[in-house]
Image (cartoon, grey):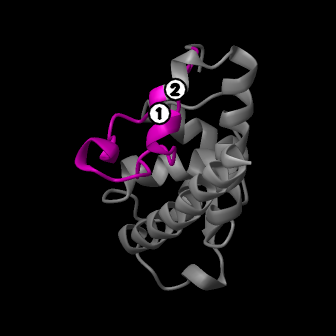
Amino acid sequence: MAASITSPCVGLCSTTLGDPVCRGCQRGDGEILDWFGLSGDERAARMAELDALRESVAGRFLRVVDADCLEAQLLRYRIRFRPEQPALSRAVELLRVGRTRIQALPRYGLVPTKAALGLDVAELHARLSQALNEAAEHRRAEQQRSSKT
């Protein structure tokens, strides 16, 4: 997509409801507050960390078998992504937006892993979201520990 994405925000910030970590973008509340005070390089590094987190977690549930097909579907349904964003991180966005409409993952260049076999897409997304939230909370705790030292 041509538009520059300056923030990983997906418009569903659960930190406004009191969550310490946003369920939408996986950033901690402090990271969200500080975001636009970070340099471009710092933001890029944080985006890479979030992509790595998403890849790690999504890889437990999904495998990308056709990245071009996935990208074509993202474009077709106008789901935003960054050119440098890894395919599994893009898949997280696809499931967030299309979890109630997607019937066959292979049509989107994805197949479930053994851990996700037999799950419908909505349940797969629910489990993926829960795992992402747990990983993001762990990331936030690590950031807090390292900032205290």
Residue at 53 percent of width and 17 percent of height = 36
Label 2 is placed on what type of residue?
Asp
Label 2 CA crowd tier, 10 Å (few <14, some 14–19, many 20+): few
Residue 82 magenta-highlighted: no
Q: Position of residue 5 (x, y in %)?
A: 55, 21
Task: Tell me: residue 101, above or below residue 44.
Answer: below
Q: Magenta stretch: dominant SS?
A: loop
Task: Tell me: residue 24, above or below residue 133.
Answer: above
Which residue in the structure is indicated by mark 1?
Answer: 32
Of residue 84 and residue 149, the one placed in the foreground of this image is 149
Quadrant of the rendered image containing residue 60:
bottom right
Residue at 65 percent of width and 49 percent of height = 143
Q: Position of residue 131 (x, y in %)?
A: 52, 69
Residue at 61 percent of width and 83 percent of height = 115
Of residue 132 and residue 146, the one placed in the foreground of this image is 146
Label 1 is placed on what type of residue?
Ile
Quadrant of the rendered image containing residue 81:
top right
Label 1 CA crowd tier, 10 Å (few <14, some 14–19, many 20+): some
* Secondary structure found at label 2: helix
Q: Are marks 1 and 2 in contact (CB under 8 Å)?
A: yes
Quadrant of the rendered image containing residue 55:
bottom right
Query: Farthest front residue?
Result: 149
Q: Would residue 34 be found to the left or right of residue 40 on screen?
A: left
Magenta stretch in the rendered image: 4-33
The answer to whether any part of residue 42 appears in the image is: yes
